[in-house]
Amino acid sequence: MKKDMILMTPRELQRMRLLDRVLESQLALQNAAVAMGVCYRQARRLKAAYLAHGAAGLAHGNRGRQPPNRQPAEVRERILSLSREKYEAFNDCHFAEMLALHEGLKVSRDTVRRWRRNAGIGPKRKRRPKKHHARRPRRSLLGEMMIWDGSPHRWFGDERPPCCLMAAIDDATSQVLALRFEEAETSLGYLRLLQAVLKNHGIPACVYQDGHGALFRHDDHWTLAEQLRGKQDPTQVGMVLRDLGIEPIRALSPQAKGRVERLFGTLQDRLIAELALAGKTTLEDANRWLADVFVAHFNRRFAVPAAKTGHLFRRPNQYELTACLSFRYEAVVGNDNTVRLGGLVIDIPPGPNQRGYAKAHTLVRQLLDGSWQVEYQQKVIATHPPTELRAPLKAKTKTEKSKGTTNWTWVYQASASTST
């Protein structure tokens, strides 16, 4: 650029023309001040600068200078290098956070975005126009409503098999209450997720959930007892929620539970990249890392305050933390005082007030640690060491079928192949 060339904005050109008319006595300075949108004193300053320096006196003094907060070129090149290599899977906002957290480089998201686009690095995903859905107001208290769901995805990268991330969040604050990786979205996964919520926060008042088969029954079979009661028995997870006093509310569309759906969208964008950065490749290691590191950091970034102070979480007792979180089976004690579930045999010792329990109807529980206990009249009468933890199956009972009627019961999976 030549030294005698001066860059001016349209506003500065207009001021120069008005001041020329003032100097030629064609326009009063007071009227020129009104036309320039400045006060009379500022108009006098502009006139003096124009007389002293010409057009350069009207140009902004910082024009052509480097801003004092401009990042050095080597910092820009280092950030772009990190973007192409170590943080390739991170979006602009997430990348800026990781630079401050792990690299000691505090750069704004807008700066990161501008540098990346100028270097030809496109956005991680394109923004789509949003569809219109009516907004469901948040609950006002922490613990008033929990939302949970599962998201099958390739969370550990395209080279590893997919798994399911189970998530529970609070509706009032969007606070993540628990996160767990499971092989699939199953009853066992929901019970383990609920166990984490109970240990870390307490028992929520209600839970908002979709129509997954682990949460709601979809069969049209009604036993005689259910017909007389006018209500079907719940699923295994439903029985746990009932005993804990948690009201289940069914969402009729994915949009209805949009907060947990948006959570999974954010996690698919952020968590996959952070898992790779942390070197977590197994479900066991990843679950420990989620509980110890990720959840707290994520909540500090995304949780919002509740509308009201206080909470509705209820502190669970020891029974609710252990025996209540279990798979349940109904069984009749044999003449040899044993309970049989397929190949599993549980011996029942003599009771304090009776010699044996033959023909007694009992409730058999398998706890989340795999151990077993047999209950009779709400008292534990026998236990058994842990075995493989597997969710029950619904199956027809042979005794009822042989009498011409059909009944259903929960069957231990080890014996499911023998059921009809």
Image (cartoon, helix red, strand yellow):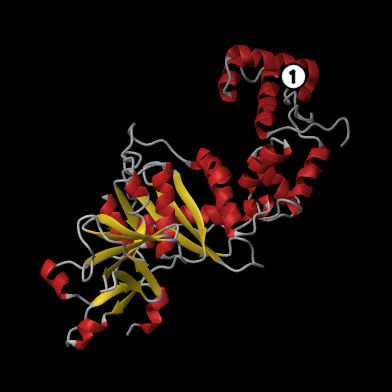
Single out the residue that lies furthest toward the right: 2
For label 1, the SS is: helix
**Is 336 or 284 nearer to us in this picture?**
336
Location of the N terminus by quadrant is: top right
Quadrant housing residue 203 = top left
Quadrant housing residue 98 = top right
**Is 359 or 103 nearer to us in this picture?**
359
Horizontal arrangement in the rendering, residue 48 relative to residue 369 (left or right): right
Give x and y (percent) for residue 114.
69, 45
Q: Is residue 8 visible?
A: yes
Residue assigned mark 1:
50
Horizontal arrangement in the rendering, residue 281 relative to residue 5 (left or right): left
Horizontal arrangement in the rendering, residue 210 relative to residue 90 (left or right): left
Residue at 26% x, 50% y is 245
Single out the residue that lies furthest toward the front: 355
Q: Is residue 359 above or below residue 420?
A: above
Give x and y (percent) for residue 205.
29, 46
Q: Is residue 349 above or below residue 291?
A: below
Q: Is residue 134 above or below residue 335?
A: above
Single out the residue that lies furthest toward the left: 228
Residue at 13% x, 66% y is 229
Tell me if mark 1 has few (under 14), some (14-19) or many (20+) residues whose alpha carbon lies within 10 angstroms of its own: some
Q: Inspect the image, locate mark 1, and give the three-letter code of the amino acid beneath it.
A: Tyr
Q: Is residue 131 visible?
A: no
